[in-house]
Amino acid sequence: MSRLAAQKKRRDYSILGPENQLAQQKGLVAAEWYTSPIPRQRMKELMKRKNGPAIRDTIIWVAALGITGTLAYYSWGTWWAILAFAVYGVLYSSPGDSRWHECGHGTAFKTPWMNEAVYQIASVMSLRPATPWRWSHTRHHTDTIIVGRDPEIIAPRPPIWRLIMMDFFRLYIGPRDVKRMIMHCFGVIHPEEKEYIPASEHRKTCWESRAYVLIFAIVIGACFYTGSILPAMFIGLPSLYGAFMVLLFGMTQHLGLKEDVLDHRLNSRTIYMNPIFRFLYWNMNYHSEHHMFPMVPYHALPALHKEMKPDCPEARKGLWAALSEVFGALIKQGKDPSYTVVKPLPATARPYYYGPGTVASDNTAAAGKG
Amino acid sequence: MWIEVCKADEIDEEDVLRFDHEDRTFAVYRTDKDEYYATDGYCTHEKFHLSNGLVMGSTIECPKHNGRFDVMTGQAKRAPVCVDLKTYPVKVENGTVYIEL
Ligand code: FES
């Protein structure tokens, strides 16, 4: 297929479009998903909440931001500032994203107020209106990678490279969310947000955005007052210039894998990562595990992975291995939008559960391509 | 009408058991204080069995999106749960748990 023909074949990924209805008709919405068999007793141990790991990680995070921030401050005006701010930006953006995520699930800390406090701070740091993203992520878990339902699909098939490139510096999703926050200040909720946020949460959405916009306004004010961009280099802009690791991690989660299936082993990717990446990403490299059992806290995901291993395809060997699989698949999808990676299961695993949405020919076509 | 659910020790402390009766499903809890409670079995957010969730004290956390309810009152405690859960009277007699429907 030519690239142009492939572009024309792209489905409508909007959650306000006709695919939403189609997904419902196919029985893919709020459906029963496959879960790996894990004894209840073991599951209870894995679900157990703790404050210790998240408090420790938060102290390390704040300290690392303090140290790199100080270095960045004193290097301002020299070439060293580029390096210092690059590190500061990654430490701001990437844990900002993963802490936003884990605290949104309420699994990071045992104590609810700690989850909520870090959730709000991390939402500011990842440039996300807090309540809309909480609900969008809820939908992402109900209807993971179901076209027309999941608002968090990073790229359609075939991919739109321009948007992916922009999001290396959060230049597509960032301005979209800032625009939405400004609209919230005037009480206006975007129609897409209305699709997944219940009306009872609209007021809260608006008040949170007013607070966030005020914070950003103060930072901008500080820039004018000091006649320097420096204040925004510490709060606000790192969400953009430090975002590339967020995107790289995010791209490995689902891209290149199946759409419209009811088995997280088919649409999510588990990867082994080094301890530094796992600290930044708060163990979300165990992504199939997280999706199948979202009530297991990040610190218990390596243990959950051990339990699920006999029932799952082999984990990818590292971030770069995963990214090369993803980019390879996206490039192939440019010509053949139906291309997906399906990894073989070990003999100990139960078969994949495709659910009602995937046509058999698509499976057979893709199965050999893993 | 009181319906027999299970033996009292079939539910661990701080745990929940799924109980299906006719075409309905319920969740029966034993709290950390050794008290028994019962609610509807499905979460009010979406149709997921609460019995796969986590009991913490007298709170149940739904396994799908981590919404929370107070099992004693059925009160919704944490988004995405917004609607309270229906509760049912429970009694324990001679080591057996009953719920009133
Ligand atoms: S189904 Fe229970 S919180 Fe969503």
Image (tube, coloured by chain):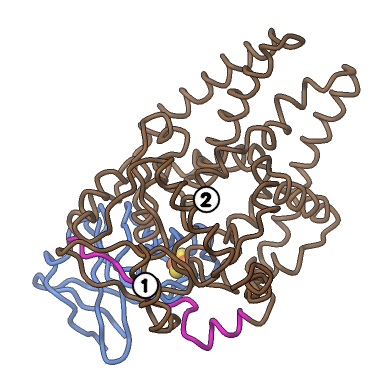
The chain coloured blue in the image: B
Residue A67 x/y as whole percent:
56, 14
Q: Which residue is mark 1?
A: A33
Residue A245 in the image: above or below residue B41: above
- What residue range appears in magenta? A19-40
State left or right for residue A189 relative to residue A124: right
Does A23 lie within the magenta span?
A: yes
Q: Nearer the viewer, mark 1 or mark 2?
A: 2
State left or right for residue A46 relative to residue B66: left
Residue B71: tell me if it is visible: no
Residue A18: tell me if it is visible: yes
The chain coloured brown in the image: A
Host chain of mark 2: A
Residue B73 x/y as whole percent:
42, 66
Mark 1 → mark 2, Cα distance in angstroms: 23 Å
Callout 2 environment at 10 Å: few (<14), some (14 to 19), or many (20+)? many
